[in-house]
Image (cartoon, rainbow, N blue to C red):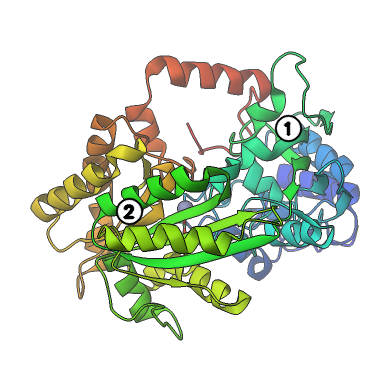
Amino acid sequence: HGLPWLGWHRRYSRLMINLLDHLAAALGPGGVIIAPEDIAPFGTDWRGLVSNMPRAVLRPRDTAGVAAALRLCAAAGVPVVPQGGNTSMVAGAVPSRDGAELVLSLSRMNAVRAIDAAGLTMEVEAGVTLRAAQDAARDAGALLPLSIGSEGSAQIGGVISTNAGGNNTLRFGNARDLVLGLEVVLADGTIWNGLRRLRKDNTGYALRQLFAGAEGTLGIVTAAVLRLARAPRQRQTCFCAIPSVEAALDLFARFRDEDEAALYAFEYISGAAMAVNQSYMPDFRLPLETASPHYVLLELATTRRRDPLRETMEAVLADALEAGVITDAAIAESEAQRAAFWAIREHLSESQRRAGASVKNDVSVPVAAVPSLLARAAAMLGARHPGARMVAFGHIGDGNIHLNALQPEDGDAAAFAARGEDLMEDVNAIVMELGGSFSAEHGIGQIKTHAFGQLRSAAEREIMHRIRAALDPAATLNPGKLF
Ligand code: MLT
Ligand code: ZN
């Protein structure tokens, strides 16, 4: 089949050569990549925490190709790691052992199959990027109401498999809430076509919900039917300076009270997070006159033609200013300015990555407990991890804070990373006391498995083990993740 097996014997066993030969036949031209320089990017995660090279990268063109590949791999007992845009924050889409696994990339399955603008649904293949799906929905006059920082690269299959959250969760829910139908290939090659587009479908176990958020350990998502929303006719976006975290929640309550349905996003940025952005974001410009200890970026949107949202925005802000709940605010005057506001929010992760080693605590607590979470975490870090910089930001309207810790300035990255597990445990102890979750939206992957083992009950983990064992008894799908 044209693959250069000769001379590869030292890197590949006879079993692996046979398997790759069969896979090449099944997947056709370009379906199997083995050159080390070509497979290298598939072995390293976005954060650069894990580097485990796959044996080869499989690139099926269609669902039948995925099924054929999984059937062959299952027969050979070779593990498969599904990968979309490789933007996981917890190394969920790269191998967990070096040189032992195959990566199956969904990138070539990138068709938007259908959009029903009247019924407000779209059917897409797993390899469509979130942005391409958003654009297709917008071109049809609708809105795919899911927005995350990595949307330019993240692919629908991964977005669903990790139940991604992001900036509009507040209004429209997580990825799971947008999934009406799903197509999945199981470890043994069985194809389940559940691509229904019904608002109501009460027929036994909610399988589509089971695969959403399963991190590729139960099956590989190959296509989905997503719920869309009507495209908004009005949008107002505002950047606010806030004197305290309590004030951020006060402002949140005011907007919810005024027009809950119009509140599409309510994001928190600490002064420390903004400072990291200032140092590492190209062309950074604060949209306000002066720096503040806290900021909120919020967006109102509506499909209404009447009742100008601008008036709502200005009225609530004026009251808040008078009450001392905000100290300054800038409303976007153009689409370009709106994009500039959001660019500041979406660049926080990248800036922090450039600033050095980080421990990412993607935690959630009941919304009212957020001020207590931040105050207690700051005190704990000062006492137990001196020099560590708390870089907090996130989806405060959902009670989901990225309570990240950045290495000390001029400190040693490796030494900081070595104490990462301890720091994470200390943060998680506070989170658990407040009735929260140690992983609000990024999932478990291979970075949070320790916390998962410690903080979830034996009963909860046992239920998950049994589901996993029923669908993938040999545990060849995305091994080393979750469990
Ligand atoms: C974000 O909301 O920007 C990411 O989920 C957060 C992160 O980098 O921790
Ligand atoms: Zn986030």
- In percent of the image, x 44 and y 60: which residue is there? 315
Q: Earlier in the sequence, mark 1 or mark 2?
A: 1
Q: Is residue 391 above or below residue 443?
A: below
* Picture quadrant of residue 317: bottom left
Looking at the picture, which amino acid does disc 1 mark?
Answer: Ala
Instruction: Give residue 306's position: percent from left, percent from top.
Output: 68, 56
In the rendered image of this protein, does residue 170 appear above or below residue 47? above
From the top left corner, tell me how far across and down residue 313 is, in percent. 49, 61
Q: Nearer the viewer, residue 91 or 233?
A: 233
x then y, percent, for residue 12: 67, 52
- Whether residue 127 is visible to the viewer of this picture, yes or no, is yes
Q: How many marks?
A: 2
Q: On screen, 50 above or below 354? A: above
- Determine the residue positioned at 57% across, 44% down: 261
User: What is the distance, in whole Å, between disc 1 and disc 2 at their CAs?
Assistant: 51 Å
- Tag on residue 74? 1
Q: Looking at the picture, which amino acid does disc 2 mark?
A: Ala
Q: Residue at x 58, y 59 (%)?
A: 309
In the rendered image, residue 118, in percent from the top left (x then y), is placed at 87, 45
**Callout 2 environment at 10 Å: few (<14), some (14 to 19), or many (20+)?**
many
* Mark 2, residue position: 248
Query: At numbered mark 1, what does the secondary structure look like: helix, strand or loop?
Result: helix
- Mark 1 touching mark 2, by CB under 8 A? no
Please give left or right for residue 165 compared with residue 296 in the image.
right
Using the rendered image of the protein, determine whether residue 79 is visible from the camera's viewpoint: no
Residue at the image point whose x is 26% and y is 49% from the top: 246
